[in-house]
Amino acid sequence: MLETRWILTIATAVGALGMWWLLPSREPRGRVAGAALLAIALGFGASQVPPIGNWAEQGIFFVLATVTIVAAIATVTMTNPVYCAIWFALSLLGTAGLFLYTGAQFLAAATIVVYAGAILVTFLFVLMLADPGGRAACDRTSWESLVSATTGVVLIGVLSITVAKVLDGTGGDEMITTLEPAKNAVLAEQHVLAIGAELFGRHLLAIEVAGVLLTAALIGAAAIVAQSGHRLKKNDQ
Amino acid sequence: MENEIALLHNYLVVGAALFGIGMIGFLSRRNMIIMFLAAEMMLQGVSLSLVGWSRFHGNFHGQTLVIFIIAVAACEAAIALALIVVLFRNRGKLDVTVLQDLREANEPAFEEEPLPELPSTETDNWPTLTPAGVTPEIESEQTDYRPVI
Protein backbone atom coordinates (compact mmCIF):
# COMPACT_ATOMS: atom_id res chain seq x y z
CA MET A 1 0.00 0.00 0.00
CA LEU A 2 1.49 3.25 -1.13
CA GLU A 3 1.52 6.30 1.06
CA THR A 4 -1.01 9.05 0.48
CA ARG A 5 1.52 11.55 -0.79
CA TRP A 6 2.90 9.21 -3.44
CA ILE A 7 -0.55 8.38 -4.75
CA LEU A 8 -1.36 12.09 -4.87
CA THR A 9 1.91 12.77 -6.68
CA ILE A 10 1.03 10.20 -9.33
CA ALA A 11 -2.45 11.73 -9.60
CA THR A 12 -0.84 15.16 -10.06
CA ALA A 13 1.38 13.97 -12.90
CA VAL A 14 -1.44 12.14 -14.68
CA GLY A 15 -3.81 15.08 -14.15
CA ALA A 16 -1.33 17.58 -15.58
CA LEU A 17 -0.94 15.44 -18.70
CA GLY A 18 -4.70 15.13 -19.06
CA MET A 19 -5.26 18.87 -18.62
CA TRP A 20 -2.57 19.60 -21.22
CA TRP A 21 -4.19 17.16 -23.62
CA LEU A 22 -7.62 18.76 -23.26
CA LEU A 23 -6.58 22.43 -23.52
CA PRO A 24 -7.18 23.93 -26.98
CA SER A 25 -4.23 23.44 -29.28
CA ARG A 26 -3.18 24.23 -32.81
CA GLU A 27 -3.86 20.73 -34.09
CA PRO A 28 -7.07 19.54 -32.46
CA ARG A 29 -6.54 16.47 -30.28
CA GLY A 30 -9.29 14.03 -29.46
CA ARG A 31 -10.96 14.53 -26.12
CA VAL A 32 -11.13 10.87 -25.12
CA ALA A 33 -7.50 10.38 -24.10
CA GLY A 34 -7.43 13.56 -22.01
CA ALA A 35 -10.73 12.71 -20.36
CA ALA A 36 -9.45 9.22 -19.52
CA LEU A 37 -6.24 10.59 -18.00
CA LEU A 38 -8.21 13.10 -15.92
CA ALA A 39 -10.64 10.42 -14.80
CA ILE A 40 -7.69 8.32 -13.58
CA ALA A 41 -6.25 11.35 -11.77
CA LEU A 42 -9.60 12.18 -10.16
CA GLY A 43 -10.03 8.57 -9.11
CA PHE A 44 -6.61 8.49 -7.46
CA GLY A 45 -7.35 11.80 -5.76
CA ALA A 46 -10.78 10.68 -4.57
CA SER A 47 -9.32 7.48 -3.12
CA GLN A 48 -7.19 9.56 -0.78
CA VAL A 49 -9.88 11.62 0.95
CA PRO A 50 -11.50 10.13 4.05
CA PRO A 51 -15.09 8.80 3.88
CA ILE A 52 -17.67 11.14 5.39
CA GLY A 53 -20.44 8.86 6.53
CA ASN A 54 -22.76 6.17 5.32
CA TRP A 55 -23.05 5.30 1.67
CA ALA A 56 -25.93 7.72 0.99
CA GLU A 57 -24.10 10.76 2.38
CA GLN A 58 -20.92 9.69 0.67
CA GLY A 59 -22.71 9.11 -2.62
CA ILE A 60 -24.46 12.50 -2.64
CA PHE A 61 -21.23 14.29 -1.85
CA PHE A 62 -19.39 12.31 -4.48
CA VAL A 63 -21.94 13.12 -7.20
CA LEU A 64 -21.94 16.84 -6.33
CA ALA A 65 -18.15 17.07 -6.22
CA THR A 66 -17.78 15.17 -9.48
CA VAL A 67 -20.30 17.40 -11.26
CA THR A 68 -18.55 20.51 -9.94
CA ILE A 69 -15.04 19.45 -10.93
CA VAL A 70 -15.87 17.88 -14.29
CA ALA A 71 -17.89 20.94 -15.28
CA ALA A 72 -15.01 23.16 -14.15
CA ILE A 73 -12.57 21.22 -16.31
CA ALA A 74 -14.93 21.46 -19.27
CA THR A 75 -15.26 25.23 -18.67
CA VAL A 76 -11.58 25.87 -19.13
CA THR A 77 -11.04 23.41 -21.98
CA MET A 78 -13.94 23.95 -24.40
CA THR A 79 -13.11 25.91 -27.54
CA ASN A 80 -16.58 27.35 -27.99
CA PRO A 81 -17.01 30.19 -25.46
CA VAL A 82 -20.77 29.69 -25.21
CA TYR A 83 -20.23 26.09 -24.13
CA CYS A 84 -17.69 27.34 -21.61
CA ALA A 85 -20.27 29.64 -20.07
CA ILE A 86 -22.88 26.88 -19.91
CA TRP A 87 -20.47 24.40 -18.33
CA PHE A 88 -19.60 27.12 -15.84
CA ALA A 89 -23.29 27.36 -14.96
CA LEU A 90 -23.31 23.62 -14.29
CA SER A 91 -20.23 23.98 -12.12
CA LEU A 92 -22.00 26.72 -10.17
CA LEU A 93 -25.01 24.49 -9.63
CA GLY A 94 -22.69 21.81 -8.28
CA THR A 95 -21.09 24.36 -5.96
CA ALA A 96 -24.53 25.44 -4.76
CA GLY A 97 -25.34 21.80 -4.04
CA LEU A 98 -22.13 21.46 -2.04
CA PHE A 99 -23.05 24.61 -0.08
CA LEU A 100 -26.44 23.10 0.70
CA TYR A 101 -24.83 19.82 1.70
CA THR A 102 -22.67 21.47 4.33
CA GLY A 103 -25.55 23.46 5.78
CA ALA A 104 -25.09 26.81 4.04
CA GLN A 105 -28.66 27.07 2.80
CA PHE A 106 -28.72 30.80 2.25
CA LEU A 107 -25.48 30.74 0.30
CA ALA A 108 -26.74 27.96 -1.95
CA ALA A 109 -29.75 30.06 -2.91
CA ALA A 110 -27.65 33.21 -3.24
CA THR A 111 -25.13 31.46 -5.51
CA ILE A 112 -27.82 30.26 -7.87
CA VAL A 113 -29.66 33.59 -7.93
CA VAL A 114 -26.66 35.90 -8.21
CA TYR A 115 -24.12 33.85 -10.14
CA ALA A 116 -26.13 31.54 -12.35
CA GLY A 117 -29.04 33.95 -12.66
CA ALA A 118 -27.38 37.32 -13.10
CA ILE A 119 -23.64 37.25 -13.66
CA LEU A 120 -23.66 34.34 -16.09
CA VAL A 121 -26.46 35.80 -18.19
CA THR A 122 -24.47 39.00 -18.48
CA PHE A 123 -21.51 36.96 -19.67
CA LEU A 124 -23.67 35.30 -22.30
CA PHE A 125 -24.94 38.69 -23.49
CA VAL A 126 -21.38 39.88 -24.01
CA LEU A 127 -20.41 36.60 -25.67
CA MET A 128 -23.20 36.97 -28.18
CA LEU A 129 -21.63 40.28 -29.25
CA ALA A 130 -18.60 38.43 -30.53
CA ASP A 131 -18.12 35.44 -32.75
CA PRO A 132 -19.79 32.77 -30.64
CA GLY A 133 -18.79 29.82 -32.77
CA GLY A 134 -15.36 29.19 -31.27
CA ARG A 135 -13.71 29.65 -34.68
CA ALA A 136 -11.55 32.63 -33.73
CA ALA A 137 -7.82 32.10 -33.34
CA CYS A 138 -7.94 33.10 -29.69
CA ASP A 139 -10.36 30.27 -28.92
CA ARG A 140 -8.45 27.61 -30.80
CA THR A 141 -5.03 28.12 -29.24
CA SER A 142 -3.80 28.56 -25.70
CA TRP A 143 -0.73 30.03 -24.06
CA GLU A 144 1.89 27.49 -22.98
CA SER A 145 -0.68 24.80 -22.30
CA LEU A 146 1.79 22.29 -20.84
CA VAL A 147 3.36 24.79 -18.43
CA SER A 148 0.08 26.26 -17.23
CA ALA A 149 -1.57 22.84 -16.84
CA THR A 150 1.40 21.62 -14.82
CA THR A 151 1.36 24.74 -12.64
CA GLY A 152 -2.30 24.45 -11.80
CA VAL A 153 -2.37 20.72 -11.20
CA VAL A 154 0.80 20.82 -9.09
CA LEU A 155 -0.88 23.50 -6.98
CA ILE A 156 -3.88 21.22 -6.49
CA GLY A 157 -1.62 18.28 -5.61
CA VAL A 158 0.46 20.21 -3.11
CA LEU A 159 -2.63 21.64 -1.44
CA SER A 160 -4.23 18.19 -1.20
CA ILE A 161 -1.08 16.65 0.30
CA THR A 162 -0.82 19.49 2.81
CA VAL A 163 -4.47 19.22 3.81
CA ALA A 164 -4.15 15.45 4.22
CA LYS A 165 -1.04 15.86 6.30
CA VAL A 166 -2.46 18.53 8.61
CA LEU A 167 -5.90 17.02 9.09
CA ASP A 168 -4.67 13.47 9.64
CA GLY A 169 -2.76 14.79 12.61
CA THR A 170 0.59 13.55 11.34
CA GLY A 171 1.88 17.01 10.46
CA GLY A 172 0.92 19.28 13.34
CA ASP A 173 1.57 18.73 17.01
CA GLU A 174 -1.65 20.20 18.33
CA MET A 175 -4.79 18.11 18.47
CA ILE A 176 -7.66 19.07 16.24
CA THR A 177 -10.82 19.36 18.28
CA THR A 178 -14.25 19.51 16.76
CA LEU A 179 -17.60 20.79 17.94
CA GLU A 180 -20.57 18.71 18.94
CA PRO A 181 -23.33 19.00 16.30
CA ALA A 182 -25.69 20.39 18.96
CA LYS A 183 -23.38 23.34 19.58
CA ASN A 184 -22.79 24.02 15.88
CA ALA A 185 -24.50 27.31 15.05
CA VAL A 186 -24.40 26.57 11.32
CA LEU A 187 -26.62 23.52 11.81
CA ALA A 188 -29.16 25.42 13.95
CA GLU A 189 -32.76 25.20 12.85
CA GLN A 190 -33.23 28.89 12.11
CA HIS A 191 -30.27 29.16 9.83
CA VAL A 192 -31.25 32.19 7.77
CA LEU A 193 -32.34 34.08 10.88
CA ALA A 194 -28.96 33.45 12.43
CA ILE A 195 -26.99 34.49 9.36
CA GLY A 196 -29.14 37.61 9.04
CA ALA A 197 -28.49 38.52 12.65
CA GLU A 198 -24.78 38.02 12.07
CA LEU A 199 -24.77 40.15 8.90
CA PHE A 200 -26.82 43.02 10.27
CA GLY A 201 -25.26 42.93 13.70
CA ARG A 202 -21.55 42.39 13.62
CA HIS A 203 -21.10 43.26 9.94
CA LEU A 204 -23.59 46.13 9.57
CA LEU A 205 -21.01 48.68 8.42
CA ALA A 206 -19.53 46.26 5.90
CA ILE A 207 -22.99 45.56 4.47
CA GLU A 208 -23.55 49.28 3.96
CA VAL A 209 -20.16 49.64 2.30
CA ALA A 210 -20.97 46.69 0.02
CA GLY A 211 -24.19 48.42 -0.99
CA VAL A 212 -22.31 51.59 -1.87
CA LEU A 213 -19.76 49.52 -3.78
CA LEU A 214 -22.46 47.84 -5.86
CA THR A 215 -24.02 51.20 -6.73
CA ALA A 216 -20.64 52.65 -7.63
CA ALA A 217 -19.83 49.65 -9.83
CA LEU A 218 -23.16 49.96 -11.63
CA ILE A 219 -22.68 53.66 -12.31
CA GLY A 220 -19.06 53.10 -13.28
CA ALA A 221 -19.90 50.34 -15.76
CA ALA A 222 -22.63 52.46 -17.36
CA ALA A 223 -20.29 55.45 -17.55
CA ILE A 224 -17.46 53.47 -19.15
CA VAL A 225 -19.65 52.04 -21.91
CA ALA A 226 -21.58 55.28 -22.53
CA GLN A 227 -18.45 57.41 -22.79
CA SER A 228 -16.75 55.05 -25.19
CA GLY A 229 -19.81 55.01 -27.44
CA HIS A 230 -19.80 58.80 -27.44
CA ARG A 231 -16.13 58.87 -28.41
CA LEU A 232 -16.60 56.32 -31.21
CA LYS A 233 -19.39 58.44 -32.68
CA LYS A 234 -17.15 61.52 -32.58
CA ASN A 235 -14.42 59.64 -34.45
CA ASP A 236 -16.85 58.61 -37.15
CA GLN A 237 -17.90 62.17 -37.91
CA MET B 1 -16.28 13.56 15.82
CA GLU B 2 -14.13 12.06 13.11
CA ASN B 3 -16.84 12.87 10.62
CA GLU B 4 -16.50 16.66 10.83
CA ILE B 5 -12.78 16.50 10.10
CA ALA B 6 -13.45 14.23 7.12
CA LEU B 7 -16.05 16.67 5.82
CA LEU B 8 -13.65 19.60 6.17
CA HIS B 9 -10.97 17.56 4.39
CA ASN B 10 -13.27 16.84 1.46
CA TYR B 11 -14.36 20.45 1.13
CA LEU B 12 -10.81 21.76 1.23
CA VAL B 13 -9.73 19.32 -1.48
CA VAL B 14 -12.66 20.18 -3.76
CA GLY B 15 -12.04 23.89 -3.15
CA ALA B 16 -8.36 23.47 -4.01
CA ALA B 17 -9.29 21.61 -7.20
CA LEU B 18 -11.66 24.37 -8.32
CA PHE B 19 -9.03 27.01 -7.54
CA GLY B 20 -6.34 25.16 -9.47
CA ILE B 21 -8.55 24.50 -12.49
CA GLY B 22 -9.53 28.16 -12.55
CA MET B 23 -5.87 29.10 -12.42
CA ILE B 24 -5.10 26.86 -15.39
CA GLY B 25 -7.89 28.52 -17.32
CA PHE B 26 -6.71 32.01 -16.44
CA LEU B 27 -3.12 31.25 -17.41
CA SER B 28 -3.72 29.42 -20.64
CA ARG B 29 -6.86 30.68 -22.32
CA ARG B 30 -6.74 33.67 -24.66
CA ASN B 31 -10.37 34.72 -24.80
CA MET B 32 -10.88 37.53 -22.29
CA ILE B 33 -14.34 36.35 -21.26
CA ILE B 34 -13.12 32.83 -20.55
CA MET B 35 -10.22 34.22 -18.53
CA PHE B 36 -12.80 36.07 -16.53
CA LEU B 37 -14.94 32.96 -16.03
CA ALA B 38 -11.81 31.20 -14.80
CA ALA B 39 -11.18 33.97 -12.28
CA GLU B 40 -14.76 33.60 -11.04
CA MET B 41 -14.11 29.88 -10.69
CA MET B 42 -11.13 30.58 -8.46
CA LEU B 43 -13.45 32.66 -6.26
CA GLN B 44 -15.82 29.69 -6.11
CA GLY B 45 -13.01 27.45 -4.92
CA VAL B 46 -12.16 29.86 -2.12
CA SER B 47 -15.86 30.10 -1.21
CA LEU B 48 -16.08 26.32 -0.86
CA SER B 49 -13.10 26.26 1.47
CA LEU B 50 -14.58 29.08 3.56
CA VAL B 51 -17.94 27.33 3.85
CA GLY B 52 -16.17 24.14 4.89
CA TRP B 53 -14.29 25.99 7.62
CA SER B 54 -17.50 27.72 8.68
CA ARG B 55 -19.15 24.34 9.26
CA PHE B 56 -16.08 23.06 11.06
CA HIS B 57 -15.87 25.97 13.49
CA GLY B 58 -19.62 26.15 13.93
CA ASN B 59 -19.96 29.88 13.37
CA PHE B 60 -20.97 32.16 10.53
CA HIS B 61 -17.73 34.01 9.90
CA GLY B 62 -16.81 32.03 6.79
CA GLN B 63 -20.28 32.23 5.32
CA THR B 64 -20.43 35.98 5.89
CA LEU B 65 -17.16 36.37 4.03
CA VAL B 66 -18.61 34.35 1.13
CA ILE B 67 -21.58 36.73 0.97
CA PHE B 68 -19.16 39.64 0.61
CA ILE B 69 -17.22 37.67 -2.01
CA ILE B 70 -20.43 37.31 -4.03
CA ALA B 71 -21.11 41.05 -3.76
CA VAL B 72 -17.58 41.96 -4.84
CA ALA B 73 -17.69 39.41 -7.67
CA ALA B 74 -20.86 41.03 -8.99
CA CYS B 75 -19.19 44.47 -8.99
CA GLU B 76 -16.10 43.03 -10.61
CA ALA B 77 -18.14 41.33 -13.32
CA ALA B 78 -20.02 44.56 -14.11
CA ILE B 79 -16.85 46.65 -14.45
CA ALA B 80 -14.85 44.01 -16.31
CA LEU B 81 -17.61 43.29 -18.80
CA ALA B 82 -18.00 47.03 -19.43
CA LEU B 83 -14.27 47.25 -20.17
CA ILE B 84 -14.43 44.17 -22.41
CA VAL B 85 -17.36 45.66 -24.35
CA VAL B 86 -15.39 48.87 -24.89
CA LEU B 87 -12.30 46.95 -26.03
CA PHE B 88 -14.42 44.85 -28.35
CA ARG B 89 -15.99 47.96 -29.88
CA ASN B 90 -12.56 49.43 -30.52
CA ARG B 91 -10.74 46.36 -31.80
CA GLY B 92 -13.41 43.88 -32.83
CA LYS B 93 -11.83 40.95 -30.98
CA LEU B 94 -12.12 39.27 -27.62
CA ASP B 95 -8.51 38.14 -27.91
CA VAL B 96 -6.31 39.21 -25.00
CA THR B 97 -3.48 39.99 -27.44
CA VAL B 98 -5.23 43.27 -28.29
CA LEU B 99 -3.71 44.47 -25.03
CA GLN B 100 -0.17 43.83 -26.20
CA ASP B 101 0.25 47.51 -27.04
CA LEU B 102 0.83 47.93 -23.32
CA ARG B 103 4.00 45.79 -23.34
CA GLU B 104 7.49 47.09 -22.60
CA ALA B 105 9.21 48.92 -25.45
CA ASN B 106 11.95 46.30 -25.83
CA GLU B 107 9.62 43.29 -25.94
CA PRO B 108 8.87 41.80 -29.35
CA ALA B 109 5.28 41.81 -30.50
CA PHE B 110 3.29 38.57 -30.54
CA GLU B 111 2.64 37.42 -34.05
CA GLU B 112 -0.17 35.06 -34.82
CA GLU B 113 0.87 32.02 -36.81
CA PRO B 114 -1.79 31.06 -39.32
CA LEU B 115 -4.04 28.28 -38.12
CA PRO B 116 -5.26 25.40 -40.25
CA GLU B 117 -8.55 26.15 -41.93
CA LEU B 118 -11.64 24.78 -40.26
CA PRO B 119 -14.21 22.98 -42.40
CA SER B 120 -16.91 25.41 -43.40
CA THR B 121 -20.19 25.16 -41.56
CA GLU B 122 -22.16 27.22 -44.07
CA THR B 123 -25.00 25.30 -45.60
CA ASP B 124 -25.83 25.71 -49.27
CA ASN B 125 -29.43 24.67 -49.09
CA TRP B 126 -31.24 26.82 -46.58
CA PRO B 127 -34.87 25.89 -46.19
CA THR B 128 -37.15 28.18 -48.12
CA LEU B 129 -40.79 29.04 -47.78
CA THR B 130 -43.15 29.04 -50.70
CA PRO B 131 -43.90 32.68 -51.47
CA ALA B 132 -47.52 33.47 -50.78
CA GLY B 133 -49.70 36.55 -51.01
CA VAL B 134 -48.50 39.86 -52.32
CA THR B 135 -45.54 41.95 -51.26
CA PRO B 136 -46.82 44.82 -49.15
CA GLU B 137 -46.07 48.27 -50.42
CA ILE B 138 -43.84 50.09 -48.00
CA GLU B 139 -43.87 53.84 -47.89
CA SER B 140 -40.52 55.42 -48.53
CA GLU B 141 -40.36 57.16 -45.17
CA GLN B 142 -40.68 53.78 -43.48
CA THR B 143 -37.76 52.34 -45.37
CA ASP B 144 -35.57 55.32 -44.62
CA TYR B 145 -34.65 54.32 -41.12
CA ARG B 146 -34.50 50.59 -41.66
CA PRO B 147 -31.10 49.11 -41.00
CA VAL B 148 -29.30 47.67 -43.97
CA ILE B 149 -28.90 43.95 -43.49
Image (cartoon, rainbow, N blue to C red):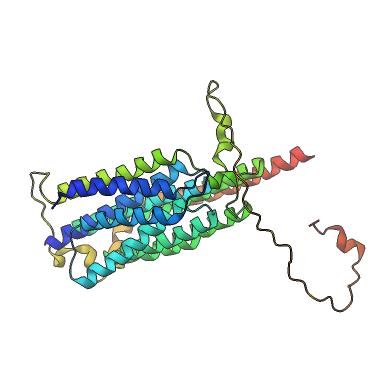
Q: Is residue A13 above or below residue B64?
A: above
Q: Is residue A166 left or right of residue B107?
A: left
In the rendered view, tell whether residue B50 sits above or below residue A231.
Answer: below
Which residue is found at the position 25% from the left and 55% from the top? A44
Closer to the camera in the image, A188 or A103 = A103
Q: Residue at x 48, y 50 (%)?
A: A29
Give A207 or A118, whichever is nearer the viewer. A118
Residue that protrudes farthest toward the top in the picture: B106
Whether residue A220 is visible to the viewer of this picture, yes or no, is no
Counting from the top left corner in percent of width and height, residue A84 is at 49, 55
Inspect this view and state whether residue B92 appears: yes
Work out which quarter of the rendered image holds the C terminus of chain A and state it. top right
Q: What percent of the width, then of the height, locates residue A10?
A: 25, 47
The location of residue A228, given as percent across then percent down, is 65, 42
Q: Taking A54 as reference, is B38 left or right?
A: right
Judged left or right of residue A109, residue A103 is left
Q: Residue at x 45, y 55 (%)?
A: A31
Rendering quarter of residue B93? top right
Left or right? Give the position of B91 relative to A99.
Answer: right
Image quadrant in which you'd find residue A122: bottom right
- Count of numbered marks: 0
Image coords of residue A33 (percent x, y):
40, 54
